[in-house]
Image (spheres, rainbow, N blue to C red):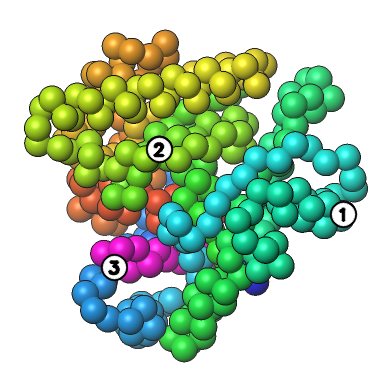
Amino acid sequence: MRLFSRKKKNAELLAISLAVDGLFAANVRHELAALPALDFVCFYPKAKQEWEVLLERLGRETRAKKMSCSLLLNAGEYQLTSLESLNVPDDELKEAARFRLKEVLDYSVDEACYDLLKVPGDTNNAGRNSSLIAVVAKSANIVKHQNAFIKAKLPLDVIDVAEMAQRNISALLETPGRGLAMLSFDINGGILTVSFAGELYLSRRLDISSTDLRNPDVDERGHVFERVSLELQRSLDHFDRQHNYITTAKLVLSPIGAVAQDLKVFLSGNMYMPVEILDLASIVNLTKIPEMEEPEKQADFFYVIGAALRREVTAI
């Protein structure tokens, strides 16, 4: 299976994450002239159960077997690599990128599956500064996931990643003609993205987790905030130099519970742009699942809801 495989036409998408603590799943219904509506979420604790057991339970207790399933890979199961634009026809891009990937992977490209995302560049200047993002995973790991879904008799049609899930959310928050920076955290670390015109232009991983942000020691938590601020400034300054035709309107923090307000105050005093905290209710209709209005719940399901918002395929 290639990454970002196209889902079945007109099939509802059920996004699934096999995370450290358990299985998360979400389904979003898209409606004309209305906010997308969160129709379904669930969580099954991992404990000592095999993933096949939890996936089988999902198939029994939900409509998963009648839907198009998307699997969100975990951090460490894939990598994103920026590549310079390749001057070859689109149908030759993947093969041309293969030679570039040989130079950056620490394992054989023959053991990898990958897809390419186009970063458009300056559309007002013949696409100047256009580039590519390669999303790469080990084939053996993808096959392992496929086999788990096959055993559970669930249709796995899409492989997705957190950066693209975050892009889906970021795109709904953009001001037309402006870029939007978004920063999220979970127990694996942080993700900074910048989207513009619905496209992912920048993604950076931060070695700072939600656990670090919630450190009960005030001084230690202050040091963590300083690290976040420094990483942001470096990454966004680099982005501005590379893409000076994009003005980034604001930085949006993902829901991360009570600590979000403290982080917002700290970053607001150190950033050159406004800082906001995202409430998913501003872009997704949560009325069917009112408990999802709680910031802590939104934090738990942030990436899987972002993956469920997927509507199009941007891979080559």
Residue range in magenta is: 11-24
Is 16 one of the magenta-colored residues? Answer: yes
Residue of label 2: 206
Q: Is residue 87 left or right of residue 69?
A: right
Residue type at tag 1: Glu
The residue furthest left is 217
- Crowding near the residue tagged with mark 3, few <14, some 14–19, many ≥20 C-alpha atoms within 10 Å: some
Tell me the quadrant of the picture where the N terminus can be found: bottom right
- How far, Cα to Cα, is label 1 from label 3? 39 Å
Q: In this view, does 190 lie to the left or right of 122?
A: left
Q: Earlier in the sequence, mark 3 or mark 2?
A: 3
- How far, Cα to Cα, is label 2 from label 1? 33 Å
Residue of label 3: 22
Name the mark nearer the viewer: 2 or 1.
2
Residue type at tag 3: Gly
Q: Residue 281: in sight, yes or no?
A: no
- From the top left corner, tell me how far across and down residue 105 is, in percent: 63, 54
SS at mark 3 in the image: strand
Give above or below for 9 relative to 131.
below
| Disc number placed over residue 92 in the picture, else none | 1
